[in-house]
Amino acid sequence: MVSVQSDRPDSGQGGEEVLVPSSVKIVVAGGFGVGKTTMVGAVSEITPLRTEELLTEAGEEIDDLYGVEGKTTTTVALDFGRITINPELVLYLFGTPGQDRFWFLWDELAIGSIGAVVLVDTRRLDAGFGAIDFFERRGIPFVVAVNCFQGSHSYTAEEMRAALDVADTVPLVLCDARDRESCKAVLVRVIEHAMNRLDVMA
Amino acid sequence: MSNSSDWWYDEAAGPMVRPYAMVSGRTRPKPAGEDLTLTTQVRALRTTTDQATLSVEHLEIIKLCRKPLSVAEVAAYLHAPLVVVKVLLSDLIQRGDVITSGPATTVTPVDMNLLQKVLDGVRAI
């Protein structure tokens, strides 16, 4: 899709064109331990990778590290996976840091994303509130995916929707974060939802 | 590829030492790397520029990026924090050793054709 020519006149490439793919991303959000990395891993073509952002860099204004000198090494881990759509287009799936204190990182993840999955666990529905609120406020298309762990109490989708207080316009799906087909279906819903939204806006 | 167990320092030194040593204490990328995001694609060029001045990490990045990779992937494979990788990449971009996909490819709202391609792609996996 993008055949980028080096814009550096001193690069000595002599006009040679090299293909650099475009990238898109979908964010997988939710509370700590809800299965975000499991979901990423279920559909990713690579074992989920982990990259780290140094907290001292990004979080200076948020976290007061004064008096906790031993904490200067704090890092925030981001787990992500990859789906190569074609040689020109790559989809990345980023799990959000689960801890609430890392909200500041969500913006970087959310900007430029196609949309998001808010993964919730029926045993801790409230852990999804923050993520739902985040994407609602920013107008980012998202679907709520309820991770149905084996043996966890089952509720109907409508009960879940009421408990989470999400609008009827937000798709709510049940899924198994360990299951590839189930997670694929969730991603498809996110993309379709984003397309519908784009259609409405057009 | 380096492995975390290969790192030369002991635990008492803390994980900050080596990352910043890699970039001579720099915490901001050069202007050439200012627009780098997590998903910016990076690809190495076959260059004839002098590699003698490059660090081991620079060379590792060039090797990794023989096929296009995102900034996040480079950071993960290099076992280095994102900020450090952005600094290293900015060096390489400025030298013309790597090129990146333009920032315009990741802005919202994404267009319908692009979404359709992603949809088809995900269905096909």
Image: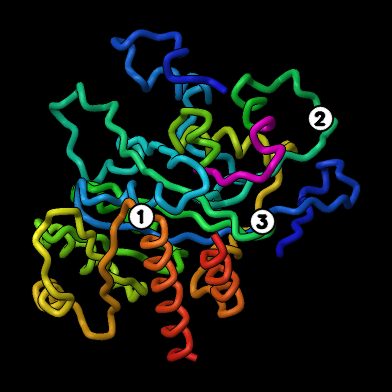
Q: Residue at x 75, y 53 (%)?
A: A19
Q: CA distance from mark 2 to mark 1?
A: 48 Å
Q: Quadrant of residue A70?
A: top left
Q: CA distance from mark 3 to mark 1?
A: 28 Å
Instruction: Please give the chain letter of the residue carrying mark 1.
Output: A
Relative depth, front residue between A92 and A145: A145
Q: Residue at x 53, y 58 (%)?
A: A91
Confirm or deny contact between disc 3 and disc 1 (CB under 8 A): no
Q: Position of residue B101 (x, y in %)?
A: 65, 55
On residue B49, the disc is 2
Q: Residues within 10 Å of mark 2 (few under 14, many from 20)?
A: few
The residue beneath circle 3 is A21
Q: Residue furthest right?
A: A14
Q: Earlier in the sequence, mark 3 or mark 1?
A: 3
Membership of B66 in magenta stretch: yes
The residue beneath circle 1 is A179
Q: What residue range appears in magenta?
A: B62-72
Which kind of residue does numbered mark 1 sit on?
Answer: Asp
Task: Mark 2 vs mark 1: tell me if same chain.
Answer: no
Q: CA distance from mark 2 to mark 3?
A: 24 Å
Secondary structure of the residue carrying numbered label 1: loop
> Comparing marks 2 and 1, which lies closer to the viewer?
1
Quarter occupied by the N terminus of chain A: bottom right
